Amino acid sequence: MTSNLPQQAPAPIDGAALLDEVEAFHRRFNVFPLEAAYVAVALWDAHAHLLDAFDSTPRLAFLSPEPGSGKSRALEVVETLVPRAMAAVDASAAALFRSVSGIDGGRPTILFDEIDTVFGPKAGENEQLRGFINAGHTRGRVMYRCVGDGSNQQVQGFPSFCAVAVAGLGSLPDTILTRSVIIRMRRRARNERAEPFRTRVHIKEGNKLRDHLAKWAETVQKKVVDAYPTLPDGVTDRPADVWEPLLAVADAAGGDWPGRARDACLTLVKASQANDKGSIGIRLLTDLRDHVLIGIDKLPTVAILDRLNALDDAPWADLNGKPLDSRRLSRMLSEYVTADGDPVVSRNIRTAGGVLKGFFAKDLEDAWVRYCPAPKSATSATPLQPSSEPLNL
């Protein structure tokens, strides 16, 4: 006998409670350095189920200076929670973008452990893989390759947009770091405990949460597509691109997640900026401003090199096995321009010993304003007092 009673709609999924469960699952096995990291990683897990709602997808990077810091374990836990996880310890760029192109009927979430073997100092450049990870950060970017046999070759575009999490020693290329939520892992202290991760047991537990995330994502997909979350003050440009999808997930979940997400955003963005010394060119500009040309309107190249190479916490005394020299200094500074739009070049400086080539502070002022971080304080560096005496060089 068929009942005519109306079917009761399934109870709505509590997104905030679900994210609480995901965070608690991570806390069982992972000891992260900051509370903000648990929030960010739980949001990242969820965002992987909503990728079609976003224009960009942040990379998740677990990095540490030493082995045994829990990076691989963090990636293992993430693997249980994301859709179509694809572990890629030693995958080529060609294999990855063919996987993302949907040959198997679904976009994978790529999890790349031991990323230092790909981008570390002994690994070479791996420009194709770097290009794939960078391009896949933004929707619509494709990797173009020639396909076919012999002379019968055609250009084909392969999609690259997918979620990527990596783990490794050291750092990453700047272009990947700026597209990443960075979790700087460290070894557990003696008083820090983590539950052992038992593959046969805990993968099933994680996969159950993964399936719940997938169902919840279906219910909020339309809401998230049209969301433009408010970002914390000061979070702009690339950090805003990184965090916007995560904040949209938090807003969709509700509860205390919108506030916690924004607190985590500020904490981790500030932490990444504190660890970011910029490119080698920006480091040079900053050291010239903060340590070499303070209170001095010009200085001969030989004196600049002496002062740069004498800086203890700087790379100038050992650039690829040899100190910075005048040729490389001139080449690096010529990449920047003066306020008038002319390249920064060495000019003649008259000293007591004759005329020497050197650089003028006013030629660098425009580059300092545009590229260098704000000075930490007016007294952050020991000033080199200007002198009215001629330079005895």
Image (cartoon, rainbow, N blue to C red):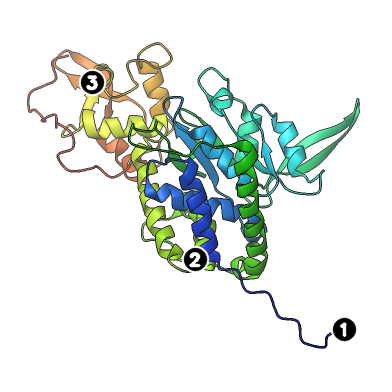
**Amino acid at circle 1:** Thr
- In 3D space, how far apart are the residues under numbered discs 3 and 2 (Cα atoms)? 47 Å
The residue that mark 3 highlights is 307
Q: Residue furthest front?
A: 1
**Amino acid at circle 3:** Arg
- Position of the N terminus, as image quadrant, is bottom right
The residue sitting at 29% across, 40% down in the picture is 365
Q: Secondary structure at mark 2?
A: loop
Q: Mark 3 or mark 2, which has the lower sequence index? A: 2
Q: Nearer the viewer, residue 185 or 348?
A: 185
- Left/right placement of residue 2 relative to residue 253 reads right
The residue that mark 1 highlights is 2
The residue that mark 2 highlights is 229
Q: Quadrant of residue 219?
A: bottom right
- Foreground mark, 2 or 1, reads 1
- Left/right placement of residue 211 relative to residue 5 reads left
Residue 172 % position (x, y): 50, 32
- Left/right placement of residue 210 relative to residue 184 reads right
**Amino acid at circle 2:** Pro
Q: Nearer the viewer, residue 32 or 287?
A: 32
